[in-house]
Image (tube, rainbow, N blue to C red):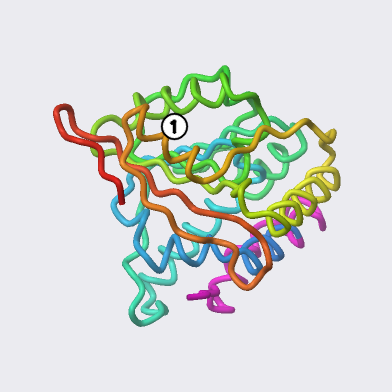
Amino acid sequence: MTTSLPRGLLAKACERFRRADRFAFHYARGKLGGDAIFAELLRSGLLTDARRILDLGSGQGSLFALLLAADEAFEQGQWPRGWAKPPKPVQMRGVELMARDVWRAAQAFGADHPVVHVEQGDMNAVDFGHCDVVTILDALHYFDFDLQRRVLERIRDAVGPGGRFITRVGDQSAGLPFKLSMWVDQVVTFSRGHRLPRLYCRPVADWCALLRDIGFDVEVKPMSGALPFANTMLVCQVRHPGTAPSMA
């Protein structure tokens, strides 16, 4: 099922980025409006109970802008029928490597926002603290396999038993759709001022095996929307001690 954001919600989420620069506004509009994962996160309620959210590789904070707009729309009775209640976080923290994106976030949310804070840092080095949900959308493949495992282990420890980790990865076993999605990913990366890095990708089955070995139960959801890509959302929950891995 392909889900899209209501126009009013999309407009509300993007409006704050006008305070930064034209790129910030148009990027948010294209990303939130054209990427199926954002609407699905809200529709399915994957973040509904999250009070403390950590987004690694957060960019300019587009996800946070959407969640603030969603809470406002819900309180005003402007919420899609059948969608889960949106979250009402008390803390949304982003970690982003690119200084320009951190600047855009500061312009969009203000320096003293009571809920949102986007900081410059490397997810391989910063302290994750304690949170309910960690998200990494399309960024795990930018660093090598050993670092991937270490980051995932630290996420497990940060959210604790029952905590949730949500990520999206490309399925390396998918052939041409995977190659196309990686090409688009690199074009977008270059347009945002990043160098074109070596990518460290895996088949979805290998991602799931790694996550289960670390201590997560994993649910696999195709997440390319109407685009001919090989993007897959992995919804991961830390197993409680003594429970057997789920093979869902």
- Residue 163 or residue 200, whichever sits in front: 200
Q: Is residue 114 visible?
A: no
Q: Position of residue 40 (x, y in %)?
A: 46, 65
In the depicted view, which residue is nearer to us: 136 or 99? 136
243 vs 95, left or right, is left
Question: Foreground: 246 or 160?
Answer: 246
Q: Residue at x 66, y 45 (%)?
A: 60
Q: Whole-percent x and y of residue 13?
A: 58, 63
- Residue 100, x across and y down, in percent: 77, 37
| Residue that badge 1 annotates | 210
Q: Residue at x 64, y 34 (%)?
A: 96
Number of labelled discs? 1
Quadrant for residue 146, please give it: top right
User: In the orientation shown, which residue stands out farthest toward the bottom?
Assistant: 81
Q: Is residue 17 magenta?
A: yes
SS at mark 1 in the image:
helix
Vertical arrangement, residue 135 with respect to residue 47, above or below: above
At label 1, which amino acid type do we have?
Leu
Please tell me whether residue 57 is drawn above or below residue 247 in the rendered image. Answer: above
Which range is magenta? Answer: 1-26
